[in-house]
Image: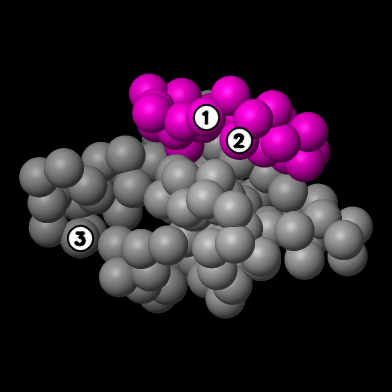
Amino acid sequence: MIHLDTSFLIRASVTGSTEDRALRGWVGAQQTLGVSTVAWAEFLCGPYERSSLEFLTSVIDRYIDFMPAHAEIAARLFNQSGQRRGSQMDCMIAATAIAEKAPIATADSRDFRRFESEGLTLALA
């Protein structure tokens, strides 16, 4: 499974973007695609085109609920990375991917590279 981050979802909504091409490639290769409910909620805050939403919901295979075990990992990531203001959502999304042992597809790799030492891997689009 490849775990999709909010920034990836946003950019994948732009036809012809690097992220759109990567997503369509994964779909063509029948790769399982997942998203945490945290990232999905962020994405749904919009704006987005209805057609983009319809396409994304048609290709996402799994929506992963944010669970207590994810919260423990997210808190550890947040505390170990200096309790950076505005980074809690990234910690929650990264925690879900770590728990699922899934690489994360993101358009903002610098936001997530700091979690690689905790087991997060980046899916290179």
Queried whether the magenta region covers residue 57, the answer comes back as: yes
Q: Secondary structure at mark 1?
A: loop
> In the image, what residue type sits under mark 1?
Glu
First to last magenta residue range: 37-62
As drawn, is 53 to the left or to the right of 61? left
Which residue is at a point 38% across and 69% down the rendered structure image? 109
Where is 42 relative to 1, above or below? above
Residue 48 at what x, y percent from top left?
A: 46, 31
Q: Which mark is residue 81?
A: 3
Which residue is at a point 22% across and 47% down the rendered structure image? 87
> In the image, what residue type sits under mark 2?
Ser
Q: Which mark is residue 52?
A: 2
Front in this rendered view, residue 76 or 108: 108
Q: Secondary structure at mark 3?
A: loop
- Mark 2 touches mark 3? (CB < 8 Å): no
Ranked by sequence position, the earlier of labels 2 and 3 is 2
Q: Which mark is residue 18?
A: none
Q: Secondary structure at mark 2?
A: helix
- Mark 2 touches mark 1? (CB < 8 Å): yes
Residue 107 at what x, y percent from top left?
A: 42, 62
As drawn, is 22 to the left or to the right of 12? right
> In the image, what residue type sits under mark 3?
Ser
- Mark 1 touches mark 3? (CB < 8 Å): no
Residue 110 at what x, y percent from top left?
A: 30, 70
Residue 9 at what x, y percent from top left?
A: 52, 46
Which residue is at a point 12% across and 58% down the rendered structure image? 82
Can the viewer see residue 5 in this picture?
no
Q: Mark 1 = which residue?
A: 49
